[in-house]
């Protein structure tokens, strides 16, 4: 497996050079950015150290050091190879539609000034991760534009999100493990917690943590677990279908069990829809 790994990385014929094609620093970077999980990173580091030994003894020795079986080590090495051999599919979620190092100018309807984003990409063999960095500094943006970087323009129409929906997303980001990775950090100049929730943030975080510990006592949660604990089983807003977080505070007001809408805007929109549908039926 190690020999095939090297052969694929170097792009040449069969090689007998022991060890992995990456050094220790690269393996740590792969762990930091999510290309490898914690166990796989430990196995990769041990493979670098034990590259000169026979395969039959390597699996058992690594398994003994990590407290698992040789079969588990062999399976994890196979997963590592599969992870790095398959190209990560491009999606709008990881912003990989633009080449790395380019500038994306996004004009949002209703806003005067456009936003400038710098695209980044991290790659380990065929595994890639792409993201954008917001450029709030005008001087740095001008300097990058003078460098002759590729420039792409994009227009978008904003979709209204109720304060309840934004609070739900902020709590998922606060507790979700996936958002602790460096590539998921907030752009430079952003504030946390969001200013609109700062007044009630301590109360909402304490309540969310209490709910999470009750359902998942482990103390570490994924984004899906946070969504399941805070959102599932709750009443949905009649208008936008967002989960109404009962017992949480918004703008200093406690959301009670009788709430049927996210906010007054959702309630007004729903009432207007109801009036329009009544008029159509009357016609």
Image: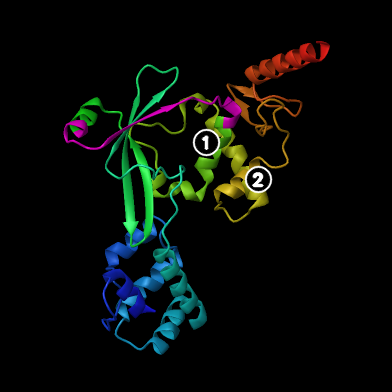
Q: Residue at x 26, y 81 (%)?
A: 17
Q: In this picture, is 223 found above or below 271?
A: below
Across and down, in percent, residue 24 comes to 29, 67
Viewer-proximal residue among 125 and 245: 125
Q: Which residue is drawn at 52% across and 47% down?
A: 176
Q: Residue at x 52, y 36 (%)?
A: 170
Across and down, in percent, residue 282 comes to 82, 11
- Picture colour scheme: rainbow
Mark number, residue 229: 2
Mark number, residue 91: none
Q: Which residues fall within the magenta stretch?
A: 144-165
Q: In this picture, is 162 found above or below 224?
A: above
Does the magenta segment cover residue 151? yes
Q: Tell me where residue 276 sits by quadrant.
A: top right
Q: How far apart are marks 2 and 1 (CA)?
A: 14 Å
Mark 1 crowdedness (10 Å alpha carbons): few <14, some 14-19, many ≥20: some
Across and down, in percent, residue 158 comes to 49, 25
Mark number, residue 170: 1
Tell me if I can see residue 69 in this picture: no
């Amino acid at each position: 497996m190690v020999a095939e790994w090297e052969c694929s990385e170097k792009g040449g014929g069969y090689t007998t050079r022991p060890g992995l094609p990456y050094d220790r620093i690269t393996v740590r970077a792969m762990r930091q950015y999510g290309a490898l999980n914690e166990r796989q990173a430990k196995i990769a580091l041990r493979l670098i150290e034990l590259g000169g030994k026979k395969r039959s003894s390597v699996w058992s020795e690594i398994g003994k050091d990590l407290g698992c079986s040789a079969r588990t080590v062999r399976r994890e090495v196979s997963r590592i190879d599969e992870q790095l051999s398959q190209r990560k599919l491009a999606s709008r979620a990881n912003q990989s539609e633009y080449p790395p190092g380019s500038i994306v100018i996004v004009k949002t309807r209703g806003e005067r000034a456009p936003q400038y984003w710098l695209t980044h990409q991290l790659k380990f063999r065929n595994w890639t991760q792409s993201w954008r960095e917001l450029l709030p500094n005008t001087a740095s943006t001008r300097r990058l534009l003078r460098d002759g970087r590729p420039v792409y323009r994009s227009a978008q129409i904003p979709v209204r999100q109720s304060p309840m929906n934004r609070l739900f997303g902020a709590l998922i980001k606060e507790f979700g493990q996936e958002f602790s990775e460096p590539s998921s950090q907030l752009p430079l100049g952003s504030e946390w917690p969001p200013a609109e929730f700062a007044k009630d943030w301590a109360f909402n975080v304490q309540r969310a943590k209490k709910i999470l510990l009750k359902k998942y006592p482990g103390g570490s949660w994924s984004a899906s677990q946070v969504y399941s604990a805070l959102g599932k089983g709750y009443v949905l807003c009649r208008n936008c279908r967002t989960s109404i977080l009962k017992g949480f505070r918004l703008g200093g007001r406690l959301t009670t069990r009788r709430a049927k809408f996210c906010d007054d805007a959702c309630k007004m929109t729903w009432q207007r829809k109801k009036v329009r549908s009544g008029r159509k039926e009357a016609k």
